Image (spheres, coloured by chain):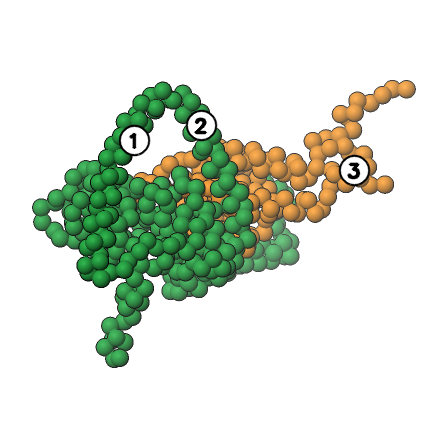
Chain colours: A orange, B green
Amino acid sequence: MERYSPAARSDRYGSRINRTQSPLRASIVPYASILIGSLVPFVLLADVMPLAPPLGFLVLIAWRIMRPGLLPLWVGVPLGAFDDLFSGQPFGSAVLLWSLTMIALEMIETRFPWRGFWQDWFSAGLAIVLYIFAAMAVSGAAPTIHQFIAAVPQVLLSVLLYPIISRMIAWLDRYRLSRSRRIG
Amino acid sequence: MAPNSSRRSGHSRRAQYSVFTGYLLAGIGALIGAGLLVISYWQPSAFADLRGAATDVAAPAGEGAAVVRGGSDSFWDRITAYYQAGQQNAALREEVEIARIRLAEAEAVEQENIRLKGLLGLSVTETEPVAVARLVGSSSTSSRRFAYLGAGRDDGVEIGMSVRSARGVVGRVLEVSRSSSRILLLTDSESVLPVRRATDETVAFAEGRGDGLLRIRLINLGINPLEVGDIFLTSGAGGYYRPGVAVAILSEKTNDGGIARLIADPSATDFVSVEPLWQPEAVESADTPIELELAE
């Protein structure tokens, strides 16, 4: 009897025979990754200047750009509120800025429907730069020139980190949609 | 990449409505955020309980990270120490000689202090720390400089208490919750600390600049007497900090003072101690409006 290669029965989400995706995993993974992204900078100790990239925000826009429509447009409110609990910013700053980011990214996508890697990186980079400086403006302290200079390494690191984060999110997306449940 | 066709609303009324509702909800969300922000400015302690509860939950994770941080520090120290053992040995021997001399001098000064205090009838003793804990986290993405301490109200920590490491002042307690507290670090741009030069009575304010350096602003203007390398201690003015704790070392001279570097680097310290308010009466009276004071 002719044997099929095992690879022919599976795609990148796993075997196609008697396996199906887990709805729980498919819905939880994006939110859990954003919440963890908000928590990671909390345990890092930066005493002289802001050094850690705003990971929660980076993961949010990476999910938003890679899977448009997966996160509802208003998702900035609950996720931003969680981020505000740990970021040290006055409560409400991420609620406001994350909501505005979601609206802006939605409008960019409607305006330029055909997108590629470079455009995604450009819009994400612009969002990151604007976000960090807007967060500085609403931080409750009068912004000084020294703060701007101190934020430059953080901004550069965050913009350069975006492609890596988006690859990680792509990996998480494959994990999210992998066929893990056995049926029959 | 072309957009997902299911995201185009086209002529479907239902799809158009759902897109519109999405924008509406996001817009309302942004407005809610702006409202919360205004409340946060107006009443900075409005969300302190919420934040405190969240930090209480996250603090154990930070505790773990702090242990790893301390461990890795000593690990690298051990490796570098291995390579520099010979040199270090000679340097340390020399240092011990000098330290012995200084110790003898300090003993003499201590004796003199006891005698003078006896003359004045003062009974100031070494203050006992309220709590000793690890720094479990910080606001490492924000432009503000806050740290989180793994001790809270249950350990006796109260708002306004000063936090110091073995090397010097780290900051001041800003918010307290059950088992964690938020600390305003000296490097935050809203932090102001009264200091004096170690060698004489030149008083100044040490203000955080937000980029890791402190700005030393002299109170008495005139010829700037400061010199690079001067060490600043807390002066005890204001009542929050105990006098005589190391704060900063001058690295650059300016017209009205200078730029100083911190002596106590919070990220390099393992444990910090929380000290009680130096002069609670002074802090209380500073908080009381002058009208109220006059009315009494």
Q: In this view, does B238 lie to the left or right of B199?
A: right
Q: Mark 1 lies on which chain?
A: B
- Say which residue label 1 marks: B96
Up the image or down, A120 lies above or below B63; here it is above
Q: Badge 3 local density, few (<14 within 10 Å), some, or many (20+)?
A: some
N-term-proximal mark, 2 vs 1: 2
Q: How crowded is mark 1: few (under 14 residues within 10 Å), some or many (20 or more)?
A: few
Read off the chain for label 3: A
Residue beneath label 3, please?
A19
Tell me the distance, in whole angstroms, between the alpha carbons under discs 3 and 2. Answer: 52 Å
Of tags 2 and 1, the one toward the viewer is 1
Q: Give coordinates of residue A32: x percent, y percent.
A: 60, 46
Which residue corresponds to mark 2? B78
User: x and y percent of residue B101 in the render?
Assistant: 23, 35
Camera-side residue: B157 or B22?
B157
Image quadrant occupied by the C terminus of chain B = bottom left
